[in-house]
Image: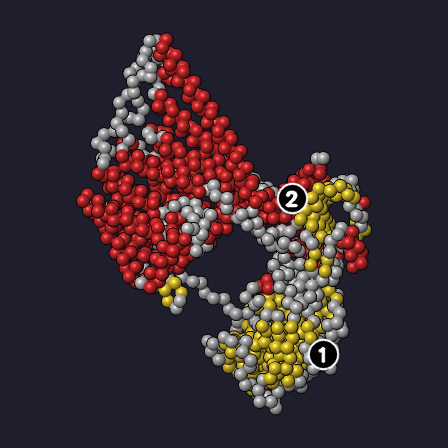
Amino acid sequence: MTRWVIAVVALIGLTMSGGVGAAGAPSPSPVPLGASTTTPTGSSVVLAMGHLDSPSNTFWEAFLEPTDSASWGLHTPPGVASNGGLVVGSSPSGPLTVGFLVSADLKFSPVAESTDGGAHWSPGELPSPLASAPDALAVEPTGETMAVVAGQRVLQTTGDLSAWTTLTSQRALRSAVPSCGVLAITAVAYNAAAQPLVGVSCSHPGQVGILAPSIGSWHDLGPSFVSGTASVIRLVPTVAGVAGLAQVRSGRADTVVGFWGDGSSSQWSGPTSFPVPSGWRVTATATGGGAGQGLAVLLGSGSSRRVEVVAGPGSSWIMLPPAPRGASGVSDVGGVIDTFVVTGSHLAVWTWTADAAGWRRAASITVPVPYGSSS
Amino acid sequence: MPGMGHAPGAGNSTIIHDFHSSLGRQAALILVVLVLLFVAWNGLRSLQYRRAVARGAQFPPPRPATSPEPVARRVLRLGFGALWVIDGLLQLQQAMPLGMASSVLRPSAAGSPEWVQRLVGFGVEVWTRHPTTAAASAVWIQLGIGIFLLVAPRGRWSRLAGLGSVGWGLVVWVFGEAFGGLFAPGLTVLFGAPGGVLLYVVAGGLIALPERAWVGQRLGRVICSAAGVFLLLMAVLQAWPGRGFWQGGSHSKPGTLAGMGQDMAATPQPHFLSSAVASFASFDEAHGWAVNLFVVVALAVTGLALLSGRRRLLYSTVIALVVLGLADWVLIEDFGVFGGTGTDPNSMVPLLLLLVTGYLAIVRAPVAVDAAAPAVAADPERRWWELLDSGYIGRVAAAVGAIAVVLIGSAPMVAASVNSRTDTNLVEAINGAPQATATSAPAFQLVDQRGQPVSMADLRGYTVAMTFLDPVCTTDCPIIAQEFKAANQLLGSSARKVRFVAIAANPQYHSVTALDDFDRAEGLASQSNWLYLTGSTSTLATVLNSYGVAVSNGVAGSMTIHADMAYVIDPSGVTRWILDADPGSSSAQQASFSSLLVAEIDQVMHS
């Protein structure tokens, strides 16, 4: 009888272990790759198009709008499948560099550089996969370039996009700046003095991690005006220095903080923040708007969208009227806010201006999305 | 890249032809063995006859009196022998070579933990790399075990057949049924728990017991009690909340049982059967709670009745279970044999067979059993083979024949599982056979990944396997590079006489750095006979044109488009074979390409 009891208990355990299982915990959401940057020479936006539920039929496209033009044009560099994502690195007066994130069996990231606004591209290669972050590439007007790559490293080159050296790594930064507790490198930028800046996620609360090199080491320049743990999601050069966005988590509440500084000292303007409502998430970001220091954030919940904008230091975030449903990108070009709605291979550009009552459809672009070319 | 990512369908004529050829060859070999056994049996009988006539003895000699095989054991042995034969015949379906892994093996492990999937993955790997060999082996092994059980009623031969059933049953239960879904959600006796083949294992174990175990009612009571405990456990599992059995359906989504029924009804089969299954699924969707309550109560009551051991109660319980079980077999398990890759009649028939065996072992239990071997009086003038009963000799010959069937079936599978070369017919099934040619390979002057100049003339004296690769392509090119790397490993020491060559096929990305990045990413940087060649855009265009390889720049995020071709060039610079290098969608197809490339390289090296 005892044997039967043991057998029954064992079998119950066995059947319950298979039959009544529990699901695993969800992983944290990554920094949204859909991003726009405006510089004095023009604006860029990267958007996912195609069949977004199928990785091999999702193609990321780069659209550029030169300063002297009023329309967006497709300028995805040729020669590489863009299924993994695109990152655009631009400087106020230098070349435009696009990096391809890896997808399928590609194990390193090709890059392409243009000095004529995307008309022609020169190829280059990063020896490792580019990180999935909107400011994973930074370009200095002289052509010097930085990139955040897999393994939490920052690579740099003086101009030859095929010859990279390691600038720093998350491990090195973590030991150099213990006050932050660097979790991950999330952005890179050059300040006006061509000094590299690295934006990070800090594990220690109350600190936005903007790290700059000092003699043989790194130190934290970032603003320390927040409670909660902060992750830099944008870091870009501006006419007056640098501007950035950080997502701050305090308990279960998320806040987006905009900040501006000269990028070479711990002096920061702003800060200005807005809470992310429960159930909403950051869907896309834009920098360089207004007089060159504006920031915009597209928030999404289901297919609902709303846009928060701030003109620059000293201003407050303004929530615009509800944006077109399903928008996946936002740009801020001289105070003109565009949102981008992708439906397969069609892109609708919706514009909102301060003197308009709402959003109006400004343009429609059909992209020859190469379905099936990556499967 | 035409055909990129294609996989041969289960109805692929090349694979089916090879499957039938394998079966034919093995059938011929089995026929030879059976003829030899018949000749041996007849020869022995003739010798016995001559000796008997010479000695004036009776022929055939009188058969010694023996007690019959216990009824329960006979039912069990013949029943499961017939089931193995049916399973073997089901393995003859032409969709088995390519459909087994994708339609049976992988889905059976889909919801199971990772360690189960990894274990099943080994079986999937063997089957997908050697589909025709594995499918043909499965036919003969199962037919052999079935025949063995049917023809060997008594003694060690019969017990050995039982052990054969245990051994192969365990292989199928683990690798084919992923432990019968024991570790996956949705486990239910209504749909096959704990795996039909596990019941074959139990039956084989019972048949392998010494015959004295069948004397008296003890074994029957153990079988009935075990069945009772099993049914009670299944009742608990069926009643467990949150598993979707209490809800027939909600928000137009079917519950677990209704969903299973709908899936089964969608299997290709005669309309009246699918409509019966679909009707029951609809009924369950509408009355899920009531159906599950009935199932839980039926399982619990019959389980308790079996545990009680009362003979009168057992009879009505077994009758009830047979009726309910057959209803489940028809309306829920849908016979288990349709769809082109049905491998067995699912669990309900073997479960009922075991139940009936348990019942018969109680109510028809023998009181004493004679030894299986005939007892013959000692006669020093007669040799041992003269003492053998002719029927016994015949059964031994049949058993040996059945073992031969199993061995002839299993030997190729064992050989395949340890063979590092995948069957080449997998890739030929989709890409076609390599094209033989005898034209001079066009000359070129390029540089390799280290910046060193390389020309076609420099490659004279080596057998060359060549292809065109885009260093930043995301799909085919890295895979083709891995196929070349695998071919290099398969060649072993012969690889030193071979040069594996790729030429850059991207108008933008073809710098030495790009090639070096590609090599390091693909683990080719240290392969000394690997050359990745490049040149100026115009030089590359000329080389590509001379080999007839078209390259076009994609737009809007498309990779560069080019043909996937491979060439085998002999040491004198003559192209001998052109292969379609489309890597296909599975690792088995890719391994198959490597094996095909090696086969052609071997042929060129030894011609």
Dot 1: what SS? strand
The residue positioned 67% from the left and 41% from the top of the image is B600
Between A366 and B570, the one nearer to me in the picture: A366
Query: Is A252 above or below relative to B301?
Result: below
The image quarter in which residue B220 lies? top left
Query: Is A277 above or below relative to A121?
Result: below
Name the residue beneath numbered marker 2: B433
The residue positioned 59% from the left and 73% from the top of the image is A342
Which quadrant is the C terminus of chain B positioned in? top right
Q: Which chain letter matches label 2?
A: B
Q: Which chain letter matches label 1?
A: A
The residue positioned 40% from the left and 61% from the top of the image is A22
Residue type at the position of mark 1: Pro
Q: Is residue B584 visible?
A: yes
Q: Is residue B412 visible?
A: no
Label of residue A66 in the image? 1
Between B15 and A26, the one nearer to me in the picture: B15
Q: Closer to the camera: disc 2 or disc 1?
A: 2
Give coordinates of residue B581: x percent, y percent. Answer: 66, 49
Between B274 and B302, the one nearer to me in the picture: B274
